[in-house]
Image (cartoon, rainbow, N blue to C red):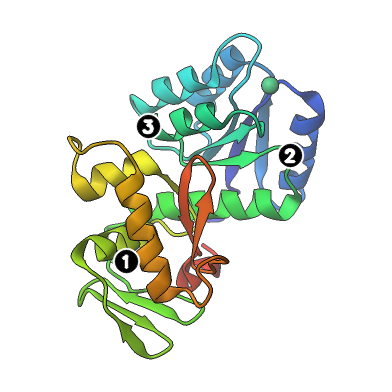
Amino acid sequence: MYQKVSVLIIEDEKSIRDFISKTLSSSEYKVATAANGKDGMALITSSLPDLVLLDLGLPDMDGLEIIKKTREWSSLPIIVISARTQEKEKVHALDAGADDYITKPFGTNELLARIRTAIRHNNRLVDDGTNSNRPYSADGLTIDFEKRRVILEDKEIHLTRVEYKIVSLLAKNSGKVMTYDTLIDQVWGPYADDNNRILRVNMANIRRKIEANPGEPKYIFTELGVGYRMLEDEGLAGGY
Ligand code: CA
């Protein structure tokens, strides 16, 4: 049985709503739209979309409220559509449970890639877990989670325990942004100092070990003011 993946767009700006809607419809997605938060919430519960694209600045409510309410009962992927100036809002949205964000203005390819990644990750979570320990592999870098080994171009890379923990978290969420706070929480625990200096120091060391040019990383990218995003696993990039 073939069913189209359904995407709900909650966005009050008509031009953006129409652009996304057209792009997704021509890429075999089933699309529903809402121009305000109230209609959006109603559609989330009535039509159970596979993914939501959510503008944070809605006329009748803060998009953050929609994320919080939805997360009370559902893990459906939510991608936030944000303006370049909404750095803090973006981080709050991710910490409240959004899966990723896309910054206006964005192109077709970026939009489709974000959607595919979010849906794949969600499928993997819903999966029976058999794939969760499959090695990460992208562009010459391999991470074997079972043996806790990191191989770059056939050479083993020696990471400290903390460095390995950071890299493996990013690799298991490859293609998705992870906020500084999420990483700090998961590596050092919820009571750790939320100052991200120690994370940045570790990242500098990691990059020295795995990047040919740490100033222009090809594996782990900085999302300024938000967190890090690791190059998508090639084993996942092929489709879903
Ligand atoms: Ca808006």
| Residue 210 horizontal/vertical position (percent) | 41, 74
| Amino acid tagged 3 | Ser
Residue beneath label 3, please?
Answer: 74
How many C-alpha atoms fall within 10 Å of the one at disc 3: few (<14), some, or many (≥20)?
A: few
Q: In the shown orientation, is residue 204 left or right of residue 56?
A: left
Lower sequence index among marks 2 and 3? 2
Lower sequence index among marks 1 and 2? 2
Check the image and report above or below for 73 versus 116.
Answer: above
Name of the residue lying farthest toward the top: 60
Residue beneath label 1, please?
Answer: 131
Front-lying residue, 228 or 29 = 228
Residue beneath label 2, please?
Answer: 20
Q: In the shown orientation, is residue 20 left or right of residue 155?
A: right
Q: Secondary structure at mark 1?
A: loop
Please report the residue visible at 34 percent of the width from the left and 56 percent of the height from the top.
201
Q: In the shown orientation, is residue 94 left or right of residue 218?
A: left
| Amino acid tagged 2 | Ile
For marks 2 and 3, give the CA distance: 23 Å
Ligand 1 neighbours mark 3 (CB distance < 8 Å): no
| Residue 160 horizontal/vertical position (percent) | 22, 68
| Amino acid tagged 1 | Asn
Please report the residue visible at 44 percent of the width from the left and 35 percent of the height from the top.
94
Q: Secondary structure at mark 2?
A: helix
